[in-house]
Amino acid sequence: MTMLAKRLRKVRTDRGLSQGQLANRLGNSSHLISQVEQGRCGLTNPRLSLAAQTLGVSIDYLIGLTDEQAPSHQLARDLNAATARVRDLEDQQAQAGIADDGDFIGVSPITPAGGDGAVVDDERITGALKFRRDWLRTHGLDPRQCRVLQVMGDSMEPTLVDGASILVNLARQRRRAGRIYVVRTEDGLIVKRAGKDRTGNWQLVSDNPDQQTWPPRPWPPDAPMIGEVKWTGRTFT
């Protein structure tokens, strides 16, 4: 059974929908849904996109590229909320008269995938990491324009491992070949290195040496850059 078959059935049943009810919402027949859930056929891209929207999950989840269900359309609101909460932390510190040489940067539960798409878990800021002020200044980083996110997937290994935290400079919107960026694609967030093909066209490049699984792909002209990755940290388990 394909991953699409398993996950379409799981999400449909989790939502309390019959095959016929889902088919009606998609404008398809219940026979087609049955065939897909048995792994006997797939869905065209338009139908797959509509199914993901109807069920409230990402396309990446349905086809098995991520284990997170939620789509990433709330990214802008998440980042704005995280920025406001980090500023509140800074204001509280200032009001308490605490003087130190570090600045807080918010940790937000937004997970860009190293593979082909990503999700936003929720709008909460889960915490804050403090970075030395002189280090931030040396690298030209404004803590109010930075966010700590978590990478999911292995397409950027060994540079960025699955589960690694990354500091993203949201103010850096200019592409430079060889740098790593968080990019918002049609299906969600991805973390890739900027590269160019032989004709000079921009590409999204994975660091994983398995180029058969993670080949370079064109940078979609309508895919905006969220920011540049400037630091990474990881937890050893």
Image (spheres, rainbow, N blue to C red):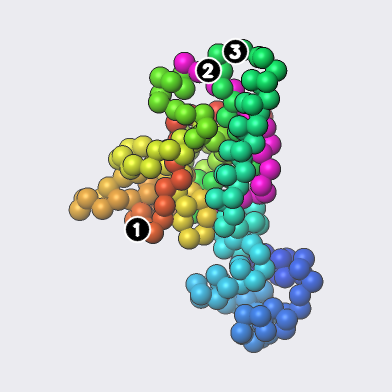
The circle on residue 132 is 2
The circle on residue 100 is 3
Q: Looking at the picture, does residue 13 appear above or below residue 68?
A: below
Q: Where is residue 130 in the image (x, y as percent from the top left)?
A: 59, 22
Residue 87 on the magenta span: no
- Identify which residue, 94 or 176, lies in the foreground: 94
Q: Mark 2 falls on what kind of element?
A: strand
Q: Quadrant of the C terminus?
A: top right
Q: Quadrant of residue 60?
A: bottom right
Q: How crowded is mark 2: few (under 14 residues within 10 Å), some or many (20 or more)?
A: few
Q: In this view, does 189 lie to the left or right of 110?
A: left
Disc 2 to disc 3, C-alpha distance: 9 Å
Q: Looking at the picture, does residue 13 appear above or below residue 61?
A: below
The circle on residue 30 is none
Q: In which quarter of the image is the N terminus?
A: bottom right
Q: In which quarter of the image is residue 16?
A: bottom right
Q: Mark 3 falls on what kind of element?
A: loop
Q: Residue at x 57, y 63 (%)?
A: 59
Q: Is residue 29 left or right of residue 65?
A: right
Can you identify the residue that label 1 sits on? 221
Of labels 1 and 3, earlier in sequence is 3
Q: Position of residue 151 (x, y in %)?
A: 55, 41
Q: Which residue is drawn at 35% across and 58% down?
A: 221
Residue lying at the far left in this picture: please name it.
199
Q: Quadrant of residue 39?
A: bottom right
Q: Mark 1 falls on what kind of element?
A: loop
Disc 1 to disc 3, C-alpha distance: 43 Å
Q: Give the range drawn in magenta.
A: 118-134
Tell me the amino acid under the disc marked 1: Pro
Of labels 1 and 2, earlier in sequence is 2
